[in-house]
Image: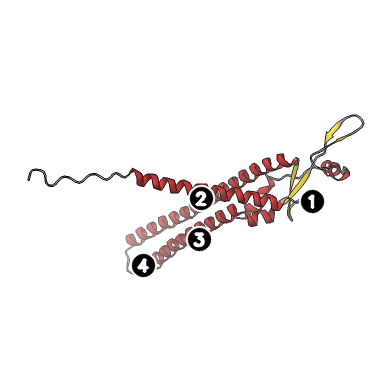
Amino acid sequence: MKNLSLILNAVLFVAVAVLYFLHFSTPQTPGKTFASADTASVVPTIAFINTDTLLQHYEFLKEQRTELEAKTKKMDQDLQNRTVSLRNEINAYQRNLPNMTLGQARAAEEDLGKKQQNLQLYQQTLQQQLMQDEAKLTQALYEKITSFLKDYSEERGINVVLKFDPSSDVLYGGRALDITQEVLEGLNDIYASEKKAGSSAKGDAGKSVKSDVKIEPKADTTAGQ
C-alpha cells in the first residue's frame, strides 16, 4: 500500500512559479478577468489539496484498503500453511533417511525439490496478484479524483490544483486556497450514491429472479376416477 500515498503525483501537478506570481500579485476575484492597457486576460486561480487528509478519509479508499488487507492476510496465511506442510515433509524425510535405500532417498529428495519449487512459484504468483490488485486500485482512485476535480474546477474557475503534503514542493498554502474538505465531501457523497445505486440494483435483480419462478399447477388427481 506504500504506492497509494504517492498516486496523486499524477493527479495534482505543481504549477510553475509564474502562476504563483500572477495569482498573488493580482488582487482580483478568482475566475474573473482583469483589463490591462492593451489586452484582457484571465487571472490564473490556484487551489491545493492536502493529499494525506484526502487519502485518509476518502471512504472508497478506506473500504478498498480494508478488502485488500483482508485478502493479503488470507493469502499470507495460506502460504504459511503450505510452508509448514513442506517443512514437516522435509523433517519426516530426514528422520526416515537412515532406513531408506539410495533409490528411495533420491526419489524423496526429487519430490521435495519439486514441491519447494512449486511453493516458490506460488509465492511469486501471490505477490504478482497483489501488485495487480493494488495497481487496479491506484487506477480507480486516479480516475475518480481526476473526474471529480475536472468538474469541480470548471464550476469554480480553478486553473491549477496542487497537492500539499510533506513530499510536495508546496511549502505553504493559505486557507483560502485549501479545497480539501470540499473535494473530500464531494467524493464521499458521490461514492455513497454509487453504493446506494449498486445496492438497489442488486435488490431489483433479486426480485426479478423471484418473479421469474413459475409455479406449475398441480395435476388433477381426480381425473379418471
Give the colour scheme of this rendering: secondary structure
Return the disc, 2 or 1, that comes first in the chain's sequence: 2
At horizontal 53% and vertical 50% (from top left) the residue drawn is 195
Q: Mark 2: which amino acid?
A: Gln
Return the disc, 1 or 4, that comes first in the chain's sequence: 4
Report x, y in % for residue 67.
52, 56
Residue receiving disc 2: 129
Return the disc, 4 or 3, that comes first in the chain's sequence: 3
Could you say whether the residue bearing mark 1 is in a helix, strand or loop? helix
Q: Report the Cα–Cα distance between label 2 and label 3.
A: 13 Å
Q: Mark 3: which amino acid?
A: Lys
Return the disc, 2 or 3, that comes first in the chain's sequence: 3
Give the residue at the far right of this rendering: 37
Taking the image as shown, residue 223 lies to the left or right of residue 122, namely left
Q: Report the Cα–Cα distance between label 1 and label 3.
A: 43 Å
Return the disc, 1 or 3, that comes first in the chain's sequence: 3
Report x, y in % for residue 80.
46, 63
Q: Report the Cα–Cα distance between label 1 and label 4.
A: 76 Å
At horizontal 51% and vertical 50% (from top left) the residue drawn is 129
Report x, y in % for residue 95.
37, 70
Is residue 50 among what the camera can see?
no
